[in-house]
Image (cartoon, helix red, strand yellow):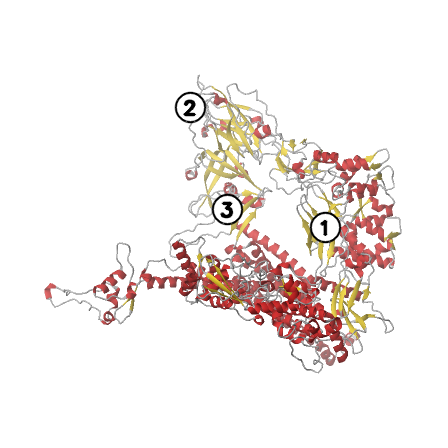
Amino acid sequence: VCRLSSNRQTPASMANHKQPATSRWDEKKEHLSAKTRNGFEQWVKRKDTFERGCRLLDALDVSRWDDPAKFRDVIVALAAVDQSLRTEAGPGESEEEVTHGGDRPRQTCAPPPLDGVRGTRRSVFEVFRRRATRDVTFTDVTLTAANERSLSDALTQQLVRDEAGRLVMPTLRYAWPAQQHSGTVAPAVGHLTADQRAQNAIFLRYCRTMWREAQREARTRLGRALADAGAVDRNRAAAAGLRALGIGQLAAWVETDSEIQRVAARDAMREREEKARVTHARFVKRKDRTRLRVPVTEAAQPAPPIPRLDLSRGENGPTRPRVERVSSTALDLARGQGLVWVHALGRGAPGRDGDLERSRRQLLARGHVLRANFDATRDATDEDFDADRFEEIHEKYTAARRRAARARRIDARREFERWNAARRGRARALDCLRALQPPAHMAAEAGAAAALRYWRRIGGLLKAVDGGLLGDWVEWSQLGGNDSAAGVTRASDVFEWAQPLKAPASPANATAVWCALAPRGCDVSRHPSCGGVSALRASLVKVLGSSCDLASAFERLRKRLAASGGEVPPTVTARDLRRCCHEGGLALSREEARQLIDCVDAYSGYGTAPFDEISALLATPVRPGGVRRALRRLTHFEATCPETGMPNAFRVTASPARVRAGPCEVDVTLANGEVRRRWKNPERTARIELLCRIGMVSKSLAHHDIETLCPLPHDLRCALPHDLASELPDSCSISAAALSGASEPRSDLAAYSAWFSASDVPPASSQAEAFGVWGAPRRAALDALLAVSDNARKEARLRLALARGTPPAAPDLWAAGPDELRAEGAPSDALLSRLVLRWRPGVNNGDGDETTVVGPVSFFSLEFSGALGSRAQRENAFSEIARDPPTARDDSFSFQHVVSGLTPDTTYVFRLRAFNGVGPGPYVWRRFSTPPARPIAPVPVRVGARAVVLRWTVPDMVARRAVELRRSFDEVSAGSLHASRVEWLRVVAAHYAPLLSFLQGVTTTRGAATHLSGSGSAGHSGPARQSLLDILESSDHDIIDWAWLCDCLGTATCRDGEETTQFLADALTCAGGHATAGAAADAAVARHVQRLASPTTYVLERCLSELHGEWEEVLRTRFGEATINGLDAGAAHQFRVRAVNAAGAASPSGRATVINTLLNSPPPPRLARAHVRATTNRHPRASAPPYGDVVGVGGFERRFAVSSTTVKLVWLGATDKLTGGHGLNGRGGGPSDRILAEWTGAAGEDEGAVSLTAVLARYSHGREDATFDGKVLPDVLTRLGAHRTHDAEDTALRAAWDELRDAARDVVRTAHFAAWWNADVVTHILQRDQGVPAGRSAGGPSLGTVTTYRGSGRGTEVHGLEPNTRYKFTLRLVSPRSHSRLSPPLEVWTAPAPPSSPIIVRDETKAIVLNWRAGPGGATKYVLESRLVNSRDDGTAAQAPTPTVRHLAAPVRAHVRHRTNATAASYDWKVSYEGHETTVRVCGLQPRSTYRFRVRALNDAGHGGPPSALTQASTASEPQMLVPRRAAEQFSVRAAGDIVVGDTILFTERLLVDRGGNGALLGEPARGAARPLASNANRGNCRSRNATGPQHVGDRTVAAHVVAEAHYTKKGVRELRLEIVWCTVSSHDAAPYVLRPGDVTQRDAAHVIQFQAFRQPWVDEHKRLP
């Protein structure tokens, strides 16, 4: 009671107790509703994703299902969509576990289906499978054994097998059953065949296989995406990645396909539009040919009325009135319509008029003759409109216009550049002239003679620069007079500075001097300052500048000249030229025509011009603006004096009418009879006297005339015409070709010699073409002016700078080159980490205004920012690192600074400025690069016979291992070179797992391990290599050395390849101390930026002679790997690499690598031919046995030495054919050539790329007997490049050591090694695989697993092989220097073992049934041979018909043979059967005859083995019929479970029929699913018609031959195929079910022996079972 009272609760307490329970239940309900709501939202989201994926899949282009690569990507995207649907469901959303109470079981709530139908689910795989079965066709599908068994033999025989022996189906497509068409009355539709159903099953399994592969690929891509993203929330990142791989990829493909389809549709539309345009143009042109102009009267005349029937005649019926005119042409139809033009209905054909011709005749008959209707051009029968021809012509003329426009633009740009250069040159020349002192100052300082020379020289240079500077030169010459200081320039006849010389140097005579200076103009090219335009130039401009087309006129002139039969080649007179120009639309006067003819005649004196030359000058069209350019190539002196340059010195007239006026006129009769008179201007003589007085003497004057006309001293005289080269200083030179104008036409004075008898020979050119607008002479003259005025211009700028207070200019800053520093004695390695910067004060370069001045320099300030791309450089932060001079107390400038502590192959940013009292000058910014570091030795990645792949940059993985190794070592050693072994291994195992795995895979030689293990040996017995990690862990030493570790890695090999450890060793050698993390990261960023901006170029060099140090450049590349082709096979090559950065700085050459190229791969070994021995045990009358020499049945093993267990192989010897003609020693030529070269001394001491003498001397130093120890043998082979050959396996190195070592002293003698190295000895290594037995796929061991021969022979016999097995044999060559790759494999099938002798199953009168068993290893098929022994049919031997074989599984057919006379061929061996079966029935034999049989086995290659033992059998003399009445006698052996193929059996079965059906037999066995007919007997034996179920109608006894059997492993069924011999039933009701003889049926073996079964005994009953 107390306990109950204590447990009793008050209502308040109960209320307080119930309230929390209610709250918890409400919270649980809210939680469940929230989860349900979230689940529904997730389901909607998944459903939207699924439907969107389906829509995108349907929108993809069908071409993606045809392309295998695109199809595979589509499957991967669908797999990603499927995975995203699973991911969106989530682990807690797809299957929610809801707990309703404390002890209630958990319930799993699955999400609703995607299609909204309860109880069904749709997946992306089902969508893919449905689409694949409809649209996809797989190609080259490899079938498995199970797939092969599901197909019929007829189908499998049509397929091919791959190398592995598996069937390959070319195409695989899903087959759908034929559908019944609507509206048809066909009762049945064709079903799929068994092969089609099997192929459908294979198709679906292949789809699932591809789907699984796509799922794996999707997971792989998702993993890569997650690894690259590095996201924190992996679930969200995985969902985003799946969306990108699935829906995102499908959407991108749809967009791409849509764009491609739009582009294709647009292109197709454009093509259709273009075709329509062409078609329309063709139609319009064809239609225009039939157009007719309709006269006005015909257009207004009404058309004839339509005839109507007259119905008023009553009984006579309707009649048609007479019509006078009927519309018979298009013109009649258009009459009265007001049409002006009408198109005829067509044109006529030859011999038949069309509507067009009839309409024309109609118009002519009425008197309408219109020209538009009879236009011959329009009515011509030309071709239809050809669009291609139109486009071709259009493109031709369009391209011509474009070329012309481009040529005009190029010419305009060139002319503008020339004009701009001339303008700048003129401005520069004027600046120089202003800075130069006038001649008056020169006269005051050096005298009047120097002033005269100075004046002439400056004038010559000015005219060479620009001929329009005459006024400036005269103005400059007047400066410095008495009144010049007062600002007044006095004009006088003679300059004051020239008055002491009494030379007429005055402004008035300056023009004469200017014309005589070079370049002197001619009548065609003459500067306006030297006399203006001549009459000849005006005539040329008139003709060339006109827009007349003279080409056709000149063509007509050529025809007239050719028709007249004149000179050959034809010539043109002035009259012909006038007429020709008149025909072309241009009027020329007689004088103008004469000037043009004389210009082309060029002083030849003929008075005519060659037609080709004048037509080339005048008939060639000249573009507007090109006249000046065309005239620039012409030179002709007629009115201009070639000596003085006087413009009007002569005047030439033709056929003068008056008599000569004196000696100033000269007449010359030309070859054509015309007379030319030249008048000489007296002013020319006065000008020559003037020039002589100034010192410019003509060569034509006599000595006394010179003394009279030129009173100046001899040193002031210069020859006329003036030569520009004499005025140039030694520093400025110009080519003679540019000055002489060698390309200009030469002048001939044969006819005009009288005119120039008193003057000098005219120059060959006016120099206008040589000088050009801005040619080499003008530039040379300007350079001379700049050199003359250099000091004056500098003084002027300095004075102006001091007056204005200008800061200094930007200095010039550069870095000294490596060649310059090496010449000064700097070491090469020191240049990798330092820069020598040099500078000089800035000066005005003359490109700008000469008034720009700069101030003097007090000191320079050099600032440094850092590496390009570093943080300081990006932030533009500079720090001052040097001043020059350091302080004001230092007076001298050093003009250089050395920046050290830099990183190789890095670009750094500097800036420099100068200071003076006014302030700082502008900065000059420069970037300089340090030379690249010495590259590592190139490592061979792949070596071939003619090519080698080299790599000289450290891979990223190797660099990471090097950093980890150095970092772990520094953690233990604290920066020293020695560390504790145990502590270092502990740190590596704890923090550097990748490095630990790497060390486990690195193996090193025993010699390298002696540092720790102390187990070094001079020999090579014992393990050659050990793991480096195992050596470290088993060592007794506590301290490891960093240098030893680097050496071990340099001689080690790795699982990833030998080059991996070499890269690692080089990376460790280059590794130094580590800076701080921030500095290292900043340097890494800077190097990355510079590598992208200016990549380093690597120069690969090959050694030509190591003895003489000769190297040649092979290639330049920016990559760290290259392939070198065209090498000699089996030869030694030595390569090295040097780096060159973008600035051109080169690194020192890296260490060289010696590589021996491989020998040429030998051809595959071949089978040796066996000796065929004659057969002696044949019948004397028989010929050669069949298949005796035929490969396939007995002939293969006769011709080739191949048996069931042995193979004899041969191969070619190691000749020049295998080594590329360079011998096995790789030194070119064969052994005889090498011996001859050594004896004659032609080879010299040069050993090529690798010197064996130097290598042996290096490793045998300090030994008088020239030997070296065995432990250095690997190093010697490595130095010679043969370590890959002799270190490939331990046996190779051990064999080399055994051959080379001196047994007495255990050393290697260098002489012995050299003889072994240079010997032309090759070892052949024959290898084979483990073999693939017949009927198995080639998925076994790889090639070269068993070495069957090693030696120098050329053949061997291989034993220990298995019968009927395929082997692959390969051959490799090994020499002291190199080795070859494996040869192509030789496939050899061993012969099958002989089968057992044929066993006689039964004999018939004309047939015998035989059986045999396969030998060990089996066979692919068999060949049964037979031979007639004797015939007992009658006394005369009959010819034996060829036995034929019918497969036991086929129905029996009648065989009819004709008997003929016997011959010797009757006793030959003949093929009776060839196939896969082992039981056959040989038909077509003779009764009462004896035959012998033998069997041969064939393999997959068709090669046969030896025959089996012989079996002799005789046909029966009387037929033995199998009948029911003799069943007990004939079937005397009880059959149990030992029924085999070939037996003749007797068995009984019960017959049950369906009572309610149509009387069909129940339990009739089917293929693979046979059911015993008696299995339904337990259902009752009632014969009542009203009962239901099966009805027993009787028993059936069957006698049949067993012709085949089949095993179904999965069902455990063994089926027998039976050929019915006879059949009986026990009742009349069972009569419909009697089997006919010859029918073929099948039964389960268990069904046959269910009741008592018997069989007929074999003839060879004792051989029936093995």
**SS category of the residue bearing label 1:** strand
Left or right, 135 with respect to 891, comes to left
Res. 1459 mark: 2
Camera-nearest residue between 1267 and 93: 1267
Query: Where does the image place residue 238, in percent across and percent down from the top left?
Result: 66, 64
Q: Does label 3 or label 2 sit earlier along the sequence? A: 3
Residue 447 x/y as whole percent: 74, 71
User: Where 554 falls versus 433 (above or below)?
Assistant: above
Q: Amino acid at mark 2?
A: Arg
Label 2 or label 1, whichever lies nearer to me, is: 1
Q: Quadrant of residue 858?
A: bottom right
Residue 522 visible in the snapshot: yes
The structure residue drawn at horizontal position 50% and vertical position 45%, both measured from the top left corner, is 1579
Residue occupied by mark 3: 195
* Residue 1054: image location, x then y, percent: 76, 49
The N terminus sits in image quarter: bottom right
Specify few, some or many for label 3: CA neighbours under 10 Å numbering under 14, 14-19, or 20 or more: some
The percent position of residue 975, horizontal first and vertical second, equals 86, 59
Question: Mark 1 belongs to which amino acid?
Answer: Glu
SS at circle 2: loop
What is the three-letter code of the residue carrying label 3?
Answer: Asp
Q: Which residue is mark 1?
A: 1101
How far apart marks 2 and 1 lie (CA) works out to 87 Å
- Quadrant of residue 1509 in the image? top right
